[in-house]
Image (tube, rainbow, N blue to C red):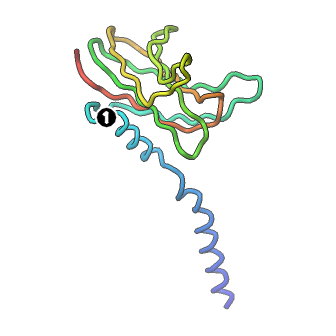
C-alpha cells in the first residue's frame, strides 16, 4: 500500500509541476505565428527572441538590441509577435546609427502594427531595438524576412 502512495504522489507532482508549461507558448510557436504574420510574400531569414523584465520605478524601460547586416536595393519585413503569457506589447524600431528608420508603433496615433517594411538603400549594419510599452514585462519574437529586390 505504501508503494502505491509513493507512486501516486510522484505522478501528481509530475502532472502538477508541468501543468503551467503545457499552457505556455513555446518560442517555436511564436516564430511560426510571426512567420504567418509576415505573409506569404516574405521569406524567413532570422528571428530574435526578446524577454525583458518590467522596468523598475523611476528607471528607463529595458531594451533588447540586435544588429543585422542588410543589403542595398532589398525590401525587408520586420514582424513582431507577443506572447499571450505576458502583458507587455512589443515595439520594434529600426535604426541606422542614431536615426530612426522605421517602427511598429506610431506615437502620434498610439497605434501598433504587427510588421513594418523597410526598403534598404545602402548596404550596412542596422540596429533593431525592441522594448515593451510602458516598461511592462514581456516576451516576443522579432522576425526578419526578405520580401523582394528592387
Q: Residue visible at 49% across and 12% down?
A: 100
Q: Position of residue 10 (x, y in %)?
A: 63, 74
Residue receiving disc 1: 39
Above-or-below relation of 24 to 116? below
Image quarter where the C terminus lies is top left
Going by the picture, which residue comes out furthest to the front? Answer: 109
The mark total stands at: 1
Residue 107 drawn at (x, y percent): 56, 18
**Quarter holding residue 33:** top left
**Residue furthest out toward the bottom:** 1
Q: Residue at x 62, y 66 (%)?
A: 16
Vertically, is 31 above or below 25?
above
Residue drawn at (37%, 31%), measured in percent from left and top? 46
Question: What is the x, y in percent for residue 55?
Answer: 69, 30
User: How far across and how far down the image is residue 83, in percent?
Assistant: 52, 42
* Residue situated in front as seen by the camera: 53 or 1: 53
Which residue is nearer to you in this view: 16 or 40?
40
73 lies above or below 13: above
Residue under the point 66% across and 25% down:
61
Q: Is residue 85 left or right of residue 37?
A: right
- Location of residue 9 by image quarter: bottom right
Badge 1 element: loop
Quadrant in which the N terminus appears: bottom right
User: In the orientation shown, which residue stands out farthest toward the left?
Assistant: 150
Relative side of 130 to 150, left or right: right
Amino acid at each position: 500500500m505504501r508503494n502505491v502512495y509513493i507512486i501516486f504522489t510522484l505522478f501528481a507532482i509530475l502532472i502538477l509541476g508541468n501543468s503551467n508549461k503545457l499552457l505556455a507558448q513555446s518560442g517555436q510557436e511564436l516564430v511560426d505565428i510571426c512567420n504567418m504574420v509576415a505573409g506569404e510574400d516574405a521569406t524567413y531569414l532570422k528571428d530574435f527572441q526578446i524577454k525583458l523584465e518590467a522596468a523598475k520605478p523611476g528607471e528607463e524601460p529595458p531594451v533588447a538590441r540586435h544588429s543585422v547586416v542588410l543589403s542595398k536595393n532589398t525590401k525587408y519585413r520586420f514582424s513582431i509577435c507577443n506572447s499571450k503569457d505576458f502583458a507587455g506589447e512589443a515595439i520594434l524600431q529600426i535604426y541606422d546609427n542614431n536615426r530612426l528608420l522605421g517602427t511598429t508603433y506610431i506615437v502620434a496615433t498610439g497605434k501598433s502594427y504587427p510588421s513594418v517594411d523597410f526598403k534598404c538603400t545602402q548596404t550596412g549594419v542596422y540596429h533593431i531595438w525592441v522594448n515593451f510599452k510602458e516598461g511592462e514585462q514581456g516576451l516576443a519574437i522579432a522576425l526578419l524576412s526578405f520580401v523582394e529586390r528592387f
